[in-house]
Image (cartoon, rainbow, N blue to C red):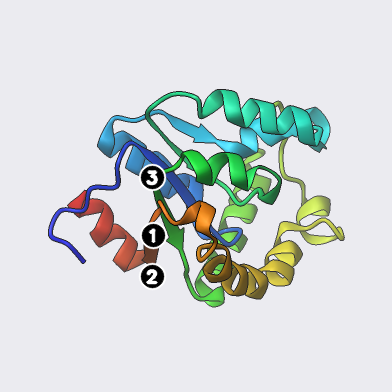
Amino acid sequence: MQDRPDPGLRISVIGTTGSGKTTFAHALAQRLDLPHVELDALHWGPDWTETPRDEFRARVAAALSAERWVTDGNYSKARDVIWSRAQTLVWLDYPLRIAFWRLLRRTLRRTITREELWNGNRETWRGAFFSRDSLLLYQLRTYRRRRRDYPILLTQPEYAHLTLVRLRSPREADRWLAQV
């Protein structure tokens, strides 16, 4: 790792559900004085309705048309829009046990506090723990696939321009962030 990493002015933070992408991206954006674009806010409408694909891609393209930003998320339906504009990809590649406990704690906190997320949405006990759409189940279903697919995707020529920063633990992420 270099002494003082320079991630550039357009950075995408990726990682499994619950890895802390939004928290990390927000901290990185503050540290570098860059706007933070949260993809979930562009994707989720009221009552947890998904924004239609073309509209979501247009929202992402508009939000990332600026020359400076940090974004977070794993939306494959807009990956080409995001990664083609990004200079750096920060991959929070944590072990499942860490990501799972982070997601469980976050979900419990949001459910108990009734924290409003995007467009009036809130996590519920039923949605979090008793639904086929549970983020906890989603994380378990997608964790291995993301770890398998990201290295393959990053070998594609259209993403050769990206600088990859692969952080394998929260401690490593904190150290990298402190050096930026």
Is residue 105 rendered to the left or right of residue 27? right
Q: Position of residue 2 (x, y in %)?
A: 17, 62
**110 is higher (above) or lower (below) than 149:** above
Residue located at (35% from left, 42% from top): 27
- The mark lying in front, picked from 3 and 2, is 3
Amino acid of disc 3 = Gln
The residue that mark 1 highlights is: 164
Residue 160 or 114: which is nearer the viewer?
160
Residue type of the residue flagged with mark 2: Ser
Q: Earlier in the sequence, mark 3 or mark 1?
A: 3
SS for dot 1: strand
The residue carrying pointer 3 sits among few (fewer than 14), some (14 to 19) or many (20 or more) residues within 10 Å by Cα, namely some
Task: Report which residue position mark 3 lands on.
Answer: 87
Q: CA distance from mark 3 to mark 1?
A: 9 Å
Q: Position of residue 68 (x, y in %)?
A: 37, 29
Determine whether the residue tagged by mark 3 lies in a helix, strand or loop: loop
